[in-house]
Image (cartoon, rainbow, N blue to C red):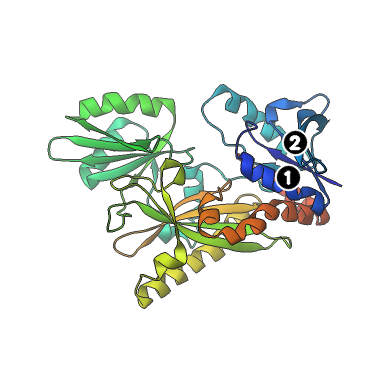
């Protein structure tokens, strides 16, 4: 039997998704484990975690060797546990005897730099690292509206919208599904708020793009791509994510809603619909190939694409650990496909030549 380990930073993370995978593992000839990187003993390569008992259909605590196949679903924060786990995962990725389904992507700015040298460059909003507060003020003077985002951010955390008015500066963000606004009377007051933010984590800035719909709701197109049981990229589905009116995020974690892509696109003119579908097809066919050629092998990617009011399409984010909620809500018939996908792709790579994947290690390691 193949040993398949799902690795997270806590045992409650994505519990329903992980349980669904585990329930299907035995039928695929796989023993499924769930563990934290911090529970690995590096001297013995043993792990304290849990094993899925297919007879009882439940998890049981167990100590076991590190599984040969690893599905990395670790989402790192600024906490001490995350900082402790990052080097452990890097160590795991460097070991010949363990195979990861996917190796992850670099931070958002490094990914931007990679894609600017590809045929997808026209779809990228200009992005630059923030070195100081004056740089932000200068961008506001020129553009009036900008976005600042954490270089290592996920799920919309830490994203801010800044707008320069005649005498004030308006800053807006979303926390705990609520829109939070602040008005600063001058740049000095803005800098007093901004500098600790920049000291805490690295940020980059982008121009503000008009990506809201007629009801002033931010929205984007979420696309999920995964490799199938033959190791070929497959489009699993598309959906619309729609945020709160007046907000800046469309993420479901920020209170957004999922809308069926076909229902949404049916309201478009035929010319607009054909144009958008052709653009999305071009992006989805080329992006995974570019990423794997330039970076490391992947198993799945979530792509967030914004549609501006002028009709332009923008690649807003690319995520190597995407969620499935938006697709499961709009296409419940995909449930079996999505829950089996990691297992079937895992079987494929155990039967193919691992050496080809391992050669990528010499490039670099990403989380």
Badge 2 marks a residue whose secondary structure is strand
Q: Is residue 330 visible?
A: yes
Closer-to-camera residue (182/95): 182
Q: Is residue 289 visible?
A: no
Q: Answer left or right for 177 relative to 118.
A: left
Rendered image: mark on residue 295: none
Rendered residue at 51%/68% (across/down)? 281
Check the image and report above or below for 311 versus 182: below
Counting residues from the start of the chain, the first of labels 1 and 2 encountered is 1
Rendered image: mark on residue 59: 2
Rendered residue at 70%/40% (across/down)? 6
**Whole-Å distance between the Cαs marked 1 and 2?**
9 Å
Residue furthest to the front in view is 56
Coordinates of residue 249 in the picture (x, y in percent): 38, 45
Q: Answer left or right for 74 relative to 64.
A: left
Rendering quarter of residue 286: bottom right
Coordinates of residue 258 in the picture (x, y in percent): 45, 54
Rendered residue at 31%/54% (across/down)? 212
């Amino acid at each position: 039997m193949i040993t398949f380990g799902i690795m997270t930073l806590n045992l409650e993370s994505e519990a329903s998704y992980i349980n669904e995978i585990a329930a299907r593992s035995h039928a695929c000839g796989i023993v499924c484990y769930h563990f934290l990187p911090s529970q690995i003993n590096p001297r013995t390569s043993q792990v304290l975690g849990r094993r899925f008992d297919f007879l009882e259909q439940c998890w049981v605590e167990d100590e076991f060797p590190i599984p040969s196949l690893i599905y990395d679903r670790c989402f790192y924060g600024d906490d001490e546990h995350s900082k402790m786990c990052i080097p452990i995962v890097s160590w795991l990725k460097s070991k010949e005897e363990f195979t990861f389904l996917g190796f992850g992507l670099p931070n958002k700015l490094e990914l931007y730099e990679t894609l600017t040298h590809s045929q997808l460059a026209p779809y990228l909003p200009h992005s630059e690292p923030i070195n100081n507060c004056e740089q932000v003020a200068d961008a506001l003077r020129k553009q009036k509206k900008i976005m600042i985002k954490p270089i290592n951010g996920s799920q919309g955390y830490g994203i801010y919208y800044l707008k320069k008015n005649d005498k004030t500066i308006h800053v807006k963000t979303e926390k705990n599904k609520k829109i939070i606004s602040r008005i600063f009377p001058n740049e000095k007051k803005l800098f007093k708020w901004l500098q600790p933010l920049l000291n805490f984590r690295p940020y980059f800035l982008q121009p503000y793009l008009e990506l809201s719909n007629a009801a002033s709701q931010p929205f984007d197109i979420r696309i999920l791509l995964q490799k199938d049981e033959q190791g070929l990229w497959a489009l699993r589905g598309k959906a619309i994510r729609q945020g709160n009116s007046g907000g800046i995020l469309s993420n479901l974690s920020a209170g957004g809603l999922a809308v069926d892509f076909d229902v949404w696109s049916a309201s478009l003119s035929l010319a607009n619909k054909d144009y958008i579908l052709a653009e999305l097809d071009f992006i989805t066919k080329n992006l995974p190939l570019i990423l794997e050629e330039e970076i490391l092998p992947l198993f799945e990617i979530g792509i967030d694409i914004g549609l501006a009011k002028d009709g332009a399409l923008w690649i807003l984010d690319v995520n190597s650990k995407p969620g499935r909620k938006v697709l499961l809500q709009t296409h419940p018939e995909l449930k079996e496909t999505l829950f089996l996908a990691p297992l079937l792709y895992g079987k494929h790579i155990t039967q193919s030549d691992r050496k080809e994947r391992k050669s990528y290690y010499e490039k670099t390691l990403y989380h």
